Image (cartoon, grey):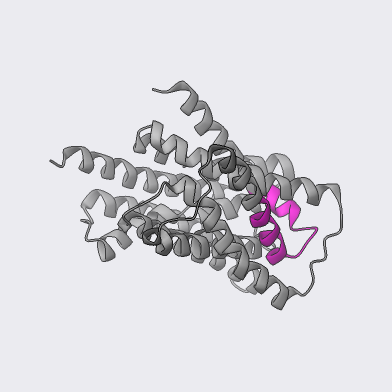
Amino acid sequence: MNSRAVVLLALLVMVWGANWPIMKMGLGHIQPFWFASFRLMIGVASMVLILLPTGRLRLPPRGDWPVIASLGLLNMGLFMVLSNLALLVVPAGRSAILAYTTPLWVAPGAALFLGERLTRGRVAGVILGLGGIVVLFNPVGFDWGDGAALLGNGLLLLAALIWAAAILHVRGHVWRSSPLDLAPWQMMVAVVPVTALAAIVEGAPRPDGSFELIWTLVYNGTLATAFAFWAAVTVNRLLPALTVSLSFLCVPAGGLVFSMLMLGEGVSLTNLGGLALIVAGVATVAVVGARERTASP
């Protein structure tokens, strides 16, 4: 196995896991729409600096425009905005767990829209994951009268569904360019509507000018967006898909741990139980899918 790719994958998981409490910290200093807008602007600038020296910054072919639009608007723009809004009222560790339920929604979505078989193994994985969501919401202990908490948790599940929709489009798309070459264009597609919404909904940006805001934005734009996108493309090319998929399950666990260390969030039995079931469900779906691909002629 490529040792450099393994190190890169470990760094990627840490960067994404730590970003959940870091986003929550940054949102204490600026409005959520503007935080997403500035993150995307920094991400675009970073990707230009990565691709321009190599001569890979060029207009994408027309055939890739649909996937640029869907990934830009859904996976980057809308997912970021919904996550930011949710983080205002939901603990960062819990947010990471709910957002990473995405693979659970991909399995039934692929059966509905891409004609993939929804085998017993995949159904079992989805049921395990849904059980984890039920545990997280703990019908007995959850405060159903807290409208803000309900909305925040709902926004995270909606963000996961939107991410799943983008993944389904990617799986059904015939690529003309590499995902890395298309990344800056996706960010540009995202930054325009997000910035327009920020101006309409929140008015002028009101950053407090704190050092914490500056470094959280830089972290989000350079590491959690530009570096992470490049790293994800690289490890997917160098490592087995199952290895990458299972490794990404460490992101919500990392979000839980980093939130405890950086924000002092408690780790409840509800969060641990929900995380365990969701990870088991997603892992089951990933392993079953890998075995089916290996067995197919």
On the rendered image, what quadrant is the C terminus found in?
top left
Vertical comparison of 147 with 287: above or below? below
Left or right, 233 with reference to 126 = right
Q: Nearer the viewer, residue 218 or 115?
A: 218
Vertical comparison of 118 with 293: above or below? below
Left or right, 176 with reference to 188 = left
Q: Name the outermost residue toward the left.
A: 297
On the question of residue 15 being in view, the answer is yes
On the question of residue 264 being in view, the answer is no
27 inside magenta stretch? yes
On the rendered image, what quadrant is the N terminus found in?
top left
* x then y, percent, for residue 6: 47, 27
* x then y, percent, for residue 185: 53, 57
Question: Residue 29's quadrant in the figure?
Answer: bottom right
102 inside magenta stretch? no
* x then y, percent, for residue 259: 67, 45
* x then y, percent, for residue 73: 52, 65
Q: Residue at x 35, y 38 (%)?
A: 241
Q: Residue at x 32, y 47 (%)?
A: 285
Question: In the image, which residues are magenta?
Answer: 20-42
Main SS class of the magenta portion in the image: helix
Q: Residue at x 39, y 47 (%)?
A: 282
Left or right, 26 with reference to 127 = right
Q: Residue at x 75, y 51 (%)?
A: 25
